[in-house]
Amino acid sequence: MQWTFTGEIERFPGPGGWYHVDVPADISDEFERDGFIPVIAEVGVSQWETSVMPKGDGTRFVAIKAAIRKANNLDEGDQVTVIIRRR
């Protein structure tokens, strides 16, 4: 199964805060279990193995690591389309 969504790149507060995009509730609700959900993610020209992770408030996110942001010229506040598929 594959999901596509668009969201804003945000950064968790504090030193070393991860950059991430929130997974919309309608997609997040399709994951029946808690914890990390292994996925293959695509953003722009990049594809990588990662996980959909819980934020602790019932929502989930996908981390956007530095190499992905650099390869796609992305930064905090940018809108990005993310494609995820279960691994």
Image (cartoon, helix red, strand yellow):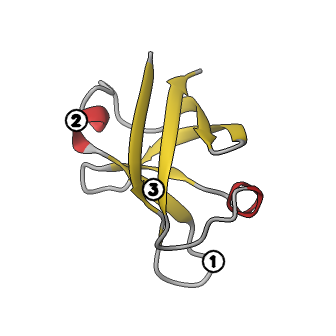
Alpha carbon distance from label 2 to label 1: 29 Å
- Identify whether 64 is placed above or below 53: below
What kind of residue is marked 1? Gly
Which label's residue is closer to the chain start, 3 or 1?
Answer: 1
Element at label 1: loop
- The image shows residue 68 at horizontal and vertical percentages of 71, 54
Asked whether the beta carbons under mark 3 and mark 1 sit within 8 Å of each other, the answer is no
Element at label 3: strand
Which label's residue is closer to the chain start, 2 or 3?
Answer: 3
Asked whether the beta carbons under mark 2 and mark 3 sit within 8 Å of each other, the answer is no
Which label's residue is closer to the chain start, 2 or 1?
Answer: 1
- The image shows residue 48 at horizontal and vertical percentages of 70, 38
Q: Which residue is mark 2?
A: 26
- The image shows residue 13 at horizontal and vertical percentages of 46, 80
Q: Which residue is mark 1?
A: 16
The residue lying at 60 percent from left, 56 percent from top is: 64
Q: What is the number of the mark on residue 66? A: none
Evaluate whether residue 48 shows in this view: yes
What kind of residue is marked 2? Asp
Looking at the image, residue 64 sits to the left or right of residue 2; the answer is right
Q: What is the number of the mark on residue 21? A: 3
Within-10-Å neighbours for mark 2: few <14, some 14–19, many 20+: few
Looking at the image, residue 64 sits to the left or right of residue 26; the answer is right
What kind of residue is marked 3? Val
- The image shows residue 23 at horizontal and vertical percentages of 36, 46
- Report the mark closest to the observer, 2 or 1: 2
Within-10-Å neighbours for mark 1: few <14, some 14–19, many 20+: few
